[in-house]
Image (tube, rainbow, N blue to C red):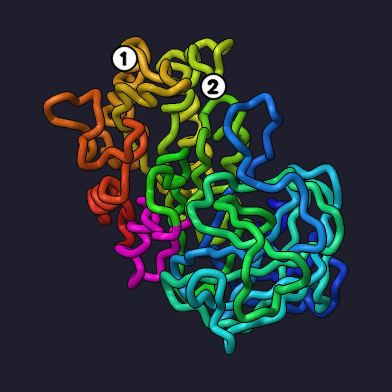
């Protein structure tokens, strides 16, 4: 069993562990139930041969990273999941604190908590492994921001990240994990180390996992505004004890790797292993279609609609095997994507035909339990191949804040949730 499977399977069974080696007697006695409230899907840092900047430092040494996470549902206690999934070296965390964010790099002083692992304030995470914290006595309101401050004492290469964080993280020299406010030496919008926050699960709590690419990840939305469409969906569900977990990865594809592993490979980690997950939305395939014959993947052959659909069918089958309701989201318009930039070539009329064929299947096949027709929401009625001007972030692919609000508001909650309203 993979280590991340071990973590989440035990969480959903009601056990709490400090490390996957399961050696701490104190931690082994914890029997509470937990549910994710925030996620950031892990990606490997790509090699320099790829054109996108990595957004993360090459390494950290004697530095503190303070990063923010906007939770969906609240709870009286939390736990943190750290990741070292794609790194070839052990990572030593010298200190870690969690608190309620106040403004910018500042925290609410009375909320500061020392985070422990098996009762100890330090942890070393082996290559490829996660580390789950002990329960933290910190009350977190719904739709609030948690600040997680991580001190890295040793020279630590950064090889695992979440690229499109859309929230400012603050980096400062020295151990400042417990400081009320920090004056950063640098900032970034990517995420490192932190991959999930759990809260104690109330009776009847459940999770919706939004599984997708950059449009789910929030590319084009305002940084630090929590304006992605899953954020807006979380607002709509905030009074229902329903968590919304964003497992989007910018550049993600159904069938192949590059800015993260393919959808079929990460579906188990990001969706099926989530405790109390009952519903998953699936919006992916536009990068499979758009990348070939562009500078992003000049040697790749564009897949057929049937090949993209076959990937969707696999995900549907696996979701149903685990008794998850799965909602298919149509692929949004992309004519003129990246016009005037070196990435132009992402769109072509042949690619548009594939998108239309995939969307027709999503709408009409009946394979999904329900459909979120995001294409119909954001397309220009006068030119259905093109995103509506008032919803366009500027690159003709990613919606802006208003577009993401419209997408979230278009989702019929009855269709999303099925029989359980």
When the figure is inspected, residue 259 is found, relative to residue 19, above or below; the finding is above
Indicate whether 31 appears above or below 186. Answer: below
- In the image, taking residue 384 as reference, residue 262 lies left or right, namely right
Q: Which residue is mark 2?
A: 296
Q: At which x and y percent is residue 8?
A: 65, 58
- Which segment did they paint magenta? 224-245
Q: Residue furthest left?
A: 382
- Picture coordinates of residue 418, whole percent (x, y): 31, 53
Residue 284 counted in the magenta span: no
Q: Is residue 2 visible?
A: no
Foreground residue among 175 and 243: 175
Residue 180 point in image, percent of width and height = 62, 81
x and y percentages locating residue 240 in the rendered image? 35, 70
Task: Say whether disc 2 or disc 1 marks the residue closer to the N-terminus.
Answer: 2
Mark nearer the viewer, 2 or 1: 2
Q: Is residue 387 above or below residue 232?
A: above
Residue labelled with disc 1: 353
Look at the image and tell me whether residue 181 can be seen.
yes
Q: Residue at x 32, y 19 (%)?
A: 357
- Identified at 61% across, 29% down, the residue is 258
The label number, if any, that marks residue 14 in the structure image: none
Q: CA distance from mark 2 to mark 1?
A: 20 Å
Q: Residue at x 54, y 71 (%)?
A: 146
Judging depth in this view, the residue of 124 and 306 nearest the camera is: 124
Queried whether the magenta region covers residue 243, the answer comes back as yes
Circle 2 — which element?
loop
Q: Dot 1: few (<14), some (14–19), or many (≥20) neighbours within 10 Å?
A: some
Mark 1 element type? helix
Give left or right: position of 131 versus 309. Answer: right
Residue 257, compared with residue 301, is above or below; it is below
């Amino acid at each position: 069993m993979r280590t991340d499977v071990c973590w989440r399977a035990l969480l959903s069974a009601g056990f709490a562990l400090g490390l996957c080696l399961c050696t701490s007697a104190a931690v082994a006695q914890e029997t509470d139930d937990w549910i994710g409230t925030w996620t950031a899907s892990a990606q490997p840092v790509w090699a320099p041969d790829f054109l996108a900047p990595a957004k993360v430092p090459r390494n950290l040494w004697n530095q503190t990273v303070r990063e923010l996470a906007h939770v969906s549902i609240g709870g009286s206690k939390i736990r943190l999941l750290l990741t070292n999934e794609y790194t070839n070296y052990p990572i030593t965390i010298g200190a870690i604190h969690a608190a309620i964010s106040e403004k910018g790099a500042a925290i609410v002083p009375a909320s500061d908590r020392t985070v422990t692992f098996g009762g100890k304030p330090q942890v070393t995470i082996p290559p490829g492994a996660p580390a789950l914290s002990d329960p933290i006595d910190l009350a977190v309101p719904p739709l609030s921001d948690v600040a997680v401050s991580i001190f890295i004492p040793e020279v630590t290469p950064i090889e695992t990240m979440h690229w499109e964080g859309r929230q400012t993280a603050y980096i400062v020299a020295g151990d400042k994990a417990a400081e009320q406010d920090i004056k950063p030496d640098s900032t970034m919008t990517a995420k490192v180390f932190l991959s999930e926050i759990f809260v104690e699960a109330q009776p009847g709590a459940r999770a919706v996992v939004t599984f997708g690419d950059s449009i789910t990840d929030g590319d084009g939305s305002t940084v630090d505004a929590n304006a992605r469409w899953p954020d807006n969906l979380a607002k709509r569900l905030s009074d229902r004890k329903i968590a919304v977990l964003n497992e989007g990865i910018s550049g993600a594809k159904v069938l192949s790797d590059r800015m993260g592993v393919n959808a079929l490979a990460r579906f188990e980690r990001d969706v099926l292993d989530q405790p109390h997950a009952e519903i998953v939305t699936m919006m992916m395939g536009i990068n499979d279609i758009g990348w070939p014959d562009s500078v992003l993947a000049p040697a790749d052959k564009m897949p057929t609609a049937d090949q993209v659909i076959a990937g969707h069918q696999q995900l549907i089958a696996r979701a149903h095997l685990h008794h998850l309701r799965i909602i298919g989201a149509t692929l949004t318009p992309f004519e003129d994507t990246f016009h005037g930039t070196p990435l132009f070539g992402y769109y072509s009329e042949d690619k548009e035909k594939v998108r239309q064929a995939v969307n027709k299947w999503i709408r009409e096949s009946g394979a999904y339990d329900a459909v979120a027709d995001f294409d119909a929401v954001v397309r220009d009625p006068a030119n259905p191949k093109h995103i509506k001007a008032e919803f366009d972030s500027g690159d003709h692919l990613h919606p802006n804040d208003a577009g993401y609000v419209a997408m979230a508001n278009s989702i019929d909650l009855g269709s999303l949730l099925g029989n359980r309203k």
